[in-house]
Image: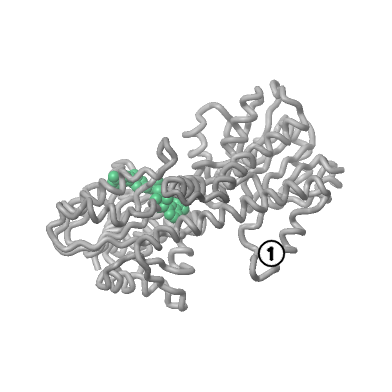
């Protein structure tokens, strides 16, 4: 089947490569000429484990190609997936301009009956809105399906190839059948394809991200109480996560959630609630608590070193919003860096994959090193912000010899507080018995 995918970001490129890998003839379209040129040269424009190999293989097999020309890319396709960005607009709502533009352009370019499948995360009601938008223009029968994407950056291919579920929101039985056909290879282990009306599909996406963000935020608050009563949130996490009704995932406290999805989706869902007079009160608080959490580590630094940080350098390990990605959208590191710079400190940082992203965002506001230990020389403390594997078992003697003072702020509780303190460090974690408690 010929499939077009519009938008070659984390979602579109992964979806396109995975659809090609199951034998479809896939063309990926993007209006960013530079991105398409890089893809045509065999370069992957962002870091996602395994994606380079998957794309190269399917390009070599002649099943995957790239273009900036939407009209030729859509011609002859049975299905077009929309996977363009829906960033947060100034008022906090999802910016639907790209989704609408692309839907209109597909309706104009179609050369036969088609199904437009929206994978971008969009406010409830967008499916119907798009239907209204293209009704006049479409020259052939055109169905619109809502097919929210649940993949995680850093494990995107695994998630796409083996989804926990596929959600298909449509009122059209014919479109649902085509979708079942496309997704059949990905659900062979019996994971469900859930068919529902478009509104329920759209709410499912926002509700899933909202619940996950709430779980993280709840644990961040539990960590705060642990700190003041002398409990250890890592023990508490196990104590509650072992309950099958709760589960172990998303219970790790840290420096707040970031990324391209949670912050904007929680904001958009909250606004939708307000607009529809069905306020999502829990989420309103989640957002506020998370913003505070992003400042927590810098506050710990201030508590230790004082408000005036002029003349000090702080070393940061981890800039990406989570490991295995180079994405820094809404990353907690950006808030921590702002807080340190605002107090006159200098920042020297290392990240295994996000160095280029960081340089593009931060320019020369911070120094970015090529190796982790280079960031440490003469620094007043190490701040660990992203739990990359390579930071998990570092050479503590080397850290100690390089730092001006042996102080670690561990924003991800990667290190055992008691052990690190025994090694002669001052250690500050999240919700654990650390040097602040001693
Ligand atoms: N990143 C994730 O982990 C993730 C997971 C699930 C859902 N989503 C949702 O999927 C959507 C895409 O997210 P992403 O992270 O892949 O975004 P992205 O920013 O990485 O990629 C979006 C791509 O769309 C292209 N684009 C924008 N407007 C276009 C237009 N008019 N015509 C052609 N191309 C256009 C951009 O050039 C870019 O390459 C968003 O709605 C997001 O919320 C993202």
Q: Quadrant of residue 237?
A: bottom right
According to the image, label 1 marks what residue? 241
Could you tell me if residue 109 is visible in this image?
no
Q: Which residue is pictured at 78% across the width and 32% down the height?
A: 304
The image shows residue 85 at horizontal and vertical percentages of 37, 47
Residue located at (48% from left, 47% from top) = 270
From what the image shows, is residue 402 above or below residue 238?
Answer: above
Tell me what residue is drawn at x 40 percent, y 63 percent: 200
Q: Bin the neighbour count of mark 1 within 10 Å (Cα to Cα): few under 14, some 14-19, many 20 and up.
A: some
Residue at 31% across / 69% down in the picture? Answer: 179
Q: Nearer the viewer, residue 414 or 115?
A: 115
Which secondary structure lies at badge 1? helix
Report whether residue 163 is seen.
Answer: yes
User: Where is residue 71 drawn, in percent x and y?
Assistant: 18, 51
x then y, percent, for residue 422:
86, 47
- The quarter of the rendered structure image containing the C terminus is top right
Task: Give the number of callouts.
Answer: 1
- Residue furthest out toward the front: 277
Question: Is 280 left, or right, of 343 in this rendering?
Answer: left
Q: For this view, does 240 lie left or right of residue 30? A: right
């Amino acid at each position: 089947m010929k499939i077009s995918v519009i938008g070659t970001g984390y979602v579109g490129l992964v979806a396109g490569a995975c659809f090609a890998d199951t034998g479809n003839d896939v063309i990926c379209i993007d209006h960013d000429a530079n991105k398409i040129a890089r893809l045509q040269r065999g370069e992957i424009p962002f870091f996602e484990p395994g994606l380079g190999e998957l794309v190269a293989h399917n390009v070599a097999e002649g099943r995957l190609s790239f273009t900036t020309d939407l009209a030729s890319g859509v011609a002859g396709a049975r299905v077009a997936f929309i996977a363009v960005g829906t960033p947060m607009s100034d008022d906090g709502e999802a910016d639907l301009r790209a989704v609408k533009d692309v839907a209109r352009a597909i309706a104009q370019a179609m050369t036969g009956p088609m199904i437009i499948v929206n994978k971008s995360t969009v406010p409830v009601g967008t499916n119907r809105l798009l239907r209204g938008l293209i009704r006049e223009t479409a020259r052939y029968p055109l169905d619109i399906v809502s097919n929210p994407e649940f993949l995680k950056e850093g494990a995107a291919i695994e998630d796409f190839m083996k989804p926990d579920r596929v959600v298909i929101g449509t009122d059209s039985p014919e479109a649902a059948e085509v979708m079942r056909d496309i997704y059949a290879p990905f659900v062979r282990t019996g994971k469900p394809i859930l068919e529902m009306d478009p509104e329920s599909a759209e709410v499912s996406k926002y509700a899933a991200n909202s619940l996950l963000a709430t779980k993280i935020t709840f644990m961040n608050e539990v960590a705060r109480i642990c700190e003041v009563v002398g409990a250890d949130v890592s023990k508490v996490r196990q104590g509650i996560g072992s309950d099958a009704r709760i589960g172990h995932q998303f219970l790790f406290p840290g420096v707040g959630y970031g990324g391209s999805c949670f912050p904007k989706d929680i904001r958009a869902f909250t606004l939708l609630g307000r607009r529809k007079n069905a306020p999502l009160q829990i989420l309103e608080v989640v957002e506020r608590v998370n913003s505070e959490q992003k400042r927590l580590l810098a506050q710990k630094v201030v508590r230790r070193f004082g408000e005036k940080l002029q003349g000090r350098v702080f070393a940061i390990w981890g800039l990406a919003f989570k490991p295995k990605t180079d994405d820094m959208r809404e990353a907690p590191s950006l808030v921590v860096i702002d807080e340190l710079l605002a107090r006159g400190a200098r920042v020297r940082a290392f990240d295994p994959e996000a160095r280029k992203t960081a340089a593009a965002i931060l320019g020369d506001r911070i120094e970015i090193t090529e190796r982790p230990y280079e960031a440490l020389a003469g620094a007043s403390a190490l701040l660990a912000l992203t739990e990359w594997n390579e930071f998990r078992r570092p050479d503590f003697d080397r850290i100690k010899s390089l730092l001006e003072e042996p102080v670690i702020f561990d924003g991800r509780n990667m290190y055992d507080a008691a052990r690190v303190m025994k090694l002669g460090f001052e250690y500050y974690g999240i919700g654990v018995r650390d040097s602040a408690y001693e």
